[in-house]
């Protein structure tokens, strides 16, 4: 099946340019971090579908509403071209030009990421899923626009598809959403096949929508081929939808790398290999935070970056840290490690939690104090108080669960 | 599949929003030539053309178009392949060039890809719109728009050509030229023209059918129409005949 393009190419810039700009802006703000990860590139482009998809739906609805209206619709109906084939043609143009926008921008960004990425490789499944989600948006818009033949179809289609995405993305049906909402990191591995499954679901759902629109507008008997397409696409949509939603595997999981990159002295800091470029700075930061307590007890000797908290010991502590949207941050890493050293496993209300004061002391000693005390509304504790608290915390082997009242005054005097 | 010329509406009924527009309507024409549907506004002319164009479906009765049954899927496709339809209102696609629009309709008409440029060029020459091909459809004057719309109906030389008020918006010279084009096409096609302009019918048609209220009031040749009623000052014989037919209907 070939698709003929009747739109002048200059007009397609109206689609290509905003899609490219959206993908570029989002990828450069979210996709590029420090370290630069391929998985972020794929995720960022996929995430833009949450915005681009409804826009494509609106555009397709606007375009097809023109054809599905008044006497032009009568001309269309009087021709031998099967209605479904015609709707596929209508949906194809916005889809193709959006794909061009994605492909052009994605290729440029891929070149940039390829030069700087420290981990992973381009995830083609995510791209396929993104392209299929765009096609679904276009099919939905085309079905609504051609079915109603009204100008209002455009905002309705855009709003409806945006609502669908917003409802699905953070629900039990999130495996049907075009993108997840949690930012992946170096530990994230996407389950192979899930994105391809979703891509198939999008295409089947799109075809089912177009088939339904074709049948409602069809004059005369629908051909056996059209009937078969309706039934087949609806059945595949339902079946795949159930399989995806009920699948026992998650779309993405967090796994530890086969080999850690360990640097630093006296405390060895073991990081995901993606962090190789920032490893010295990270190790230096961690050692500065840990330094005041290294001699207190026999540990810690090693801190390991992990995707999720696991059982650990004072000797071999674990911590979680992934780059946020702003990339690698010493200050944030220091705060996370300091907190990891002081956390007592108790559920003490913030206003009574002495560990915050001790965390603050660690950060001040390491030179990362900044606004911690003001933000937490606590005063720094003296060194001997903090050390005594940590000795008690690590030495007992059981949660201390002290409260502020158990320590010397740590609140500012009234 | 070989198609015979003409059409047959046998006891056809059609309702629009539950209001009966045609009830047990019979009309047939089984040869090449031009049939003119004359009648006042609301007479049912457009409905008859929409039925013949297979864009409306009768609630009762049978239709045969080009000797084929539109209720049979394969026949319907074949009928539409040989059909040209010009609706009364605007059928232009906005935002594209005239050339792209005609290519689009040619594609809808399943004209083979390699023949589309020639088919478009042919109708562009017939309707004298070759100079407009790169213009956008929204940049055309009323008369130019109508000529482009007619051109789409003529694409691929249809065997059943249905024209609803085709000369609306055309200037006198263009109307004369258009009549000649229709006469030329009618050499090997059945053309049905719905209009309220008696002079168009007289100039183009081999047969005239006057309808009003979904009923046939007159069915004959243009020469026959000229013999109905008395001559009136400032009117052609055919116009006087048409008025006489309509008045006679109203009187009954």
Image: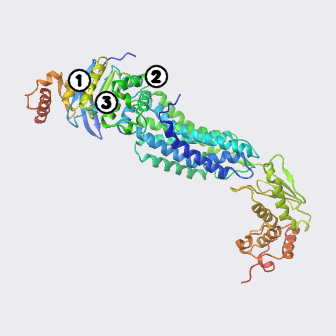
Q: Is residue A179 left or right of residue B149?
A: right
Disc 1: which residue: B204
Inspect this view and state whether residue B29 appears.
Answer: no
Q: Is residue A140 above or below residue A229?
A: below
Secondary structure category for the residue under label 1: helix
Of residues A243 and A319, the one drawn nearer to the viewer in this rendering: A319
Residue A174 is marked as none
Report the residue marked by disc 2: B112
Residue toward you, A114 or A373: A114
Residue A219 found in image quarter: top left
In whole angstroms, how far apart are the C-alphas of marks 3 and 1? 22 Å
Residue A364 is situated, as x and y percent measured from the top left of the image, at 80, 70
Callouts 1 and 2 in the same chain: yes
Q: Residue at x 24, y 24 (%)?
A: B35
Visual colour scheme: rainbow
Which element type, helix, strand or loop, lies under badge 3?
helix
Residue A244 x, y percent position in the rendering: 63, 43
Seen in the picture, residue A8 relative to A399 is either above or below; the reply is above
Q: Which residue is mark 3?
A: B51
Res B4 seen here: yes
The disc numbered 3 marks a residue on which chain? B
| Neighbourhood count class around disc 1 (C-alpha, 10 Å): few under 14, some 14–19, many 20 upward | many
Q: Earlier in the sequence, mark 3 or mark 1?
A: 3
Circle nearer the viewer, 3 or 1: 1
Circle 2 SS class: loop
Question: Residue B44 versus residue B200: which sits nearer the camera?
Answer: B200
């Amino acid at each position: 099946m070939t698709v003929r393009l009747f739109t002048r190419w200059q007009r397609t810039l109206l689609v290509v340019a905003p899609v490219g700009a959206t993908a570029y802006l989002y990828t450069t703000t979210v996709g590029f971090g420090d370290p630069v990860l391929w998985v972020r590139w794929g995720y960022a482009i996929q995430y833009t579908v949450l915005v681009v998809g409804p826009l494509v739906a609106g555009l397709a609805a606007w375009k097809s509403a023109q054809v599905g209206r008044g006497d032009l619709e009568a001309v269309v109906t009087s021709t031998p071209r099967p209605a479904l084939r015609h709707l596929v043609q209508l949906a194809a143009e916005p889809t193709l030009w959006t794909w061009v926008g994605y492909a052009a921008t994605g290729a440029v960004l891929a070149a940039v990421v390829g030069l700087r990425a420290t981990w992973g490789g381009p995830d083609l499944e995510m791209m396929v899923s993104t392209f299929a989600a765009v096609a679904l948006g276009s099919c939905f818009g085309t079905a609504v626009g051609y079915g109603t033949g009204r100008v209002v179809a455009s905002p309705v289609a855009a709003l409806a598809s945006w609502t669908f995405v917003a409802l699905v993305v953070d629900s039990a049906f999130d495996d049907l959403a075009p993108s997840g909402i949690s930012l992946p990191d170096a530990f994230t591995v996407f389950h192979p096949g899930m994105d391809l499954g979703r891509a198939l679901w999008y295409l089947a759902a799109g075809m089912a929508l177009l088939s339904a629109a074709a049948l409602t507008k069809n004059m005369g008997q629908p051909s056996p081929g059209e009937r078969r397409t309706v039934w087949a696409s609806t059945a595949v949509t339902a079946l795949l939808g159930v399989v995806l939603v009920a699948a026992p595997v998650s779309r993405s999981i967090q796994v530890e790398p086969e080999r850690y990159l360990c640097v630093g002295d006296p405390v060895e800091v073991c990081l995901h290999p993606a962090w190789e470029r920032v490893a010295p700075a990270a190790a230096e930061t961690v050692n500065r935070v840990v330094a005041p307590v290294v001699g207190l007890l026999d540990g810690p000797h090693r801190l390991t970056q992990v995707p999720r908290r696991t059982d650990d010991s004072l000797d071999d502590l674990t911590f979680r840290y992934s780059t946020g949207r702003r990339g690698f941050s010493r200050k944030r890493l220091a705060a996370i490690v300091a907190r990891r050293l002081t956390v007592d496993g108790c559920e003490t209300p913030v206003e009574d939690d002495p560990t915050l004061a001790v965390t603050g002391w660690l950060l001040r000693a390491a030179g990362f104090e900044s606004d911690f005390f003001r933000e937490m509304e606590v005063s720094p504790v003296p060194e001997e108080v903090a050390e005594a608290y940590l000795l008690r915390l690590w030495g007992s082997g059981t949660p201390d669960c002290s409260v502020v009242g158990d320590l010397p005054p740590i609140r500012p005097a009234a | 599949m070989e198609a015979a010329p003409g059409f047959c509406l046998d006891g056809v009924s059609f309702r629009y929003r539950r209001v009966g527009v045609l009830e047990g309507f019979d009309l047939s024409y089984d040869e090449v030539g031009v049939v003119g549907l004359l009648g006042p506004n609301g007479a049912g002319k457009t409905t008859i053309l929409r039925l013949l164009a297979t864009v409306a479906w009768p609630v009762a009765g049978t239709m045969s178009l080009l000797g084929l049954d539109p209720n049979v899927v394969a026949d319907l496709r074949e009928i539409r392949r040989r059909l040209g339809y010009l609706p009364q209102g605007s059928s232009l696609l906005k935002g594209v060039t005239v050339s792209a629009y005609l290519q689009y309709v040619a594609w809808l008409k399943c004209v083979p890809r390699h023949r589309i440029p020639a088919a478009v060029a042919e109708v562009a020459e017939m309707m004298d719109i070759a100079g407009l091909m790169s213009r956008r459809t929204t940049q055309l004057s009323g008369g130019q728009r109508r000529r482009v719309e007619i051109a789409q109906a003529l694409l691929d030389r249809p065997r059943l050509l249905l024209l609803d008020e085709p000369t609306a918006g055309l200037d006198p010279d263009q109307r004369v030229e258009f009549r000649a084009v229709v006469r030329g096409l009618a050499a090997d096609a059945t053309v049905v023209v719905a209009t309220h302009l008696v002079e168009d019918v007289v100039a183009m048609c081999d047969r005239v059918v006057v309808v009003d209220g979904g009923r046939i009031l007159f069915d004959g040749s243009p020469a026959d129409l000229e013999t109905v009623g008395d001559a009136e000052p400032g009117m052609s014989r055919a116009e006087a005949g048409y008025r006489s037919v309509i008045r006679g209907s109203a009187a009954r």
